[in-house]
Amino acid sequence: MRDPNRIEPMIQLLRDIWYSYPDLRLTQLIMNALNINSDPYYIEDDKLKEALQKYKELARRENFDQKSNIQDPE
């Protein structure tokens, strides 16, 4: 049996990313994170988690870049 304690951290990770990209559908988010063109059925949870963590870092950098491009009104 797989460890049920893996579920909550994965859900939290998905939640964090999804709020950064609220216009994406869940499967779009997952496929974008995995960056594959094949069936994700056989992707193990640890590989998905690793891909999601990288995607989260990308979202964080993009949000930082967008905020840094905002001009302060004078």
Image: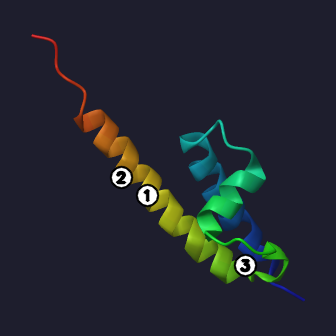
Give the residue type that dot 2 points to: Arg
Q: Mark 2 vs mark 3: which is more N-terminal?
A: 3
Q: Measured from the top left, where is residue 54 in percent x and y?
A: 49, 68
In the depicted structure, whether residue 71 falls above or below residue 33? above
Q: Name the residue under label 1.
A: 58
Label 3: which secondary element: helix
Give the side of residue 50 with respect to residue 67, left or right.
right
Which one is in front, 17 or 7? 17
Give the side of residue 56 with respect to residue 15, left or right.
left
The residues bearing labels 2 and 3 have C-alpha atoms spaced at a distance of 24 Å
Farthest front residue in view? 37
Q: Mark 3 vs mark 1: which is more N-terminal?
A: 3
* Number of other residues with Cα within 10 Å of mark 2, as a class: few under 14, some 14 to 19, many 20 or more: few
Closer to the camera: disc 2 or disc 3?
A: 2
The answer to the question of whether label 2 and label 3 lie on touching residues, with beta carbons closer than 8 A, is no
Give the side of residue 73 with respect to residue 50, left or right.
left
Q: Measured from the top left, where is residue 15 in percent x and y?
A: 65, 50
Label 1: which secondary element: helix
The residues bearing labels 2 and 1 have C-alpha atoms spaced at a distance of 5 Å
Give the residue type that dot 1 points to: Leu
Q: Name the residue under label 3.
A: 45
The answer to the question of whether label 2 and label 1 lie on touching residues, with beta carbons closer than 8 A, is yes
Residue ID at (67%, 43%): 24
Q: Mark 2 points at which residue?
A: 61
